[in-house]
Image: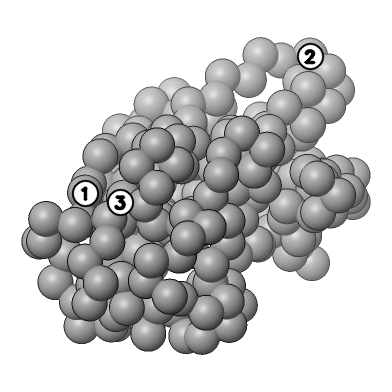
Amino acid sequence: MSTTTSTENSGLMQVLNPVFTKRYNVNLDVIAVGTGKALRLAVNGDVDVVFVHAPTAELKFVTAGYGTDRQAVMHNDFVLIGPKSNPAAIEINQSITSALQQIARAQVPFISRGDDSGTHKKELALWRQAKITTAEPWYLEVGQSMGAVINIADEKQAYTLTDRGTYLAFKDKIDLIIVNEGDNALFNPYHIIAVNPARHKHVNYELAKKYIAFITGTEGQALIGAYQKHGEQLFYPDAR
């Protein structure tokens, strides 16, 4: 399975996958990368199932015939985090567009994943929405996973965009705080997709379907809904 670094960094995979592997007596290899790379692995037939969070890219993948059985699994949201000193004077409930514009005006450091992940795709869309050009000295692309980016932002006392789940998993290790949240544009849905056996006959489609049924079924959804860090729920089940 290829999946995002957010599902891995948050610890969710360590909750879900042992239950599945024990039930079906299988080995499940997880490749945690950015959504762009996760989908490319699936296009190449290098994985059996993909679990990601970039709806536009997912739909292109399915429409092109590379994926099938796409199902909604869960959602959380993105949050903007930064130093407690908050040099851009961002308010917690203002629009994300105005928050990013304030970062640009203040020219304070912003760390971008720069890795074609779902978070990176969302971040770039938000900058476009704010009509901000990111080719500036204060904007640093690092090509790293979400956890690594949070650590870099912490070291540099910079702002960054993260999914809430990974932030909560790292919260007790860093000094960064949530400075902006709640905008509808920060909604973050996750879907699971089987690799199309018509494209790659060697894929284990039957087990992929079983994993999809597990993660979208009553038990998988209950595990997702119950998973917490620091007393806060990281993901909200979406399967119907």
Cβ atoms under marks 1 and 3 closer than 8 Å: yes
Which residue is under mark 2? 25
Q: Amino acid at mark 3?
A: Ser
Q: Amino acid at mark 2?
A: Asn
The image quarter containing residue 201 is: top left
Q: Quarter of the image for the C terminus: give it.
A: bottom right
Answer left or right for 63 relative to 48: left
Q: Nearer the viewer, residue 202 or 20?
A: 20
Q: Is residue 176 visible?
A: yes
Q: Residue 88: horizontal and vertical position, in percent?
A: 37, 71
Q: Residue 73: horizontal and vertical position, in percent?
A: 68, 56
Q: Gap between marks 2 and 3, in whole Å? A: 39 Å
Residue at 11 percent across and 55 percent down: it is 137
Q: Nearer the viewer, residue 238 or 229?
A: 229
Which residue is under mark 3? 112
The colouring scheme, among rainbow, by chain, secondary structure or one colour, is one colour
Instruction: Give the vertical position of 140 relative to 41 (above or below).
Output: below
Mark 2 or 3: in front is: 3
Which residue is under mark 1? 140
Q: Gap between marks 1 and 3, in whole Å? A: 6 Å
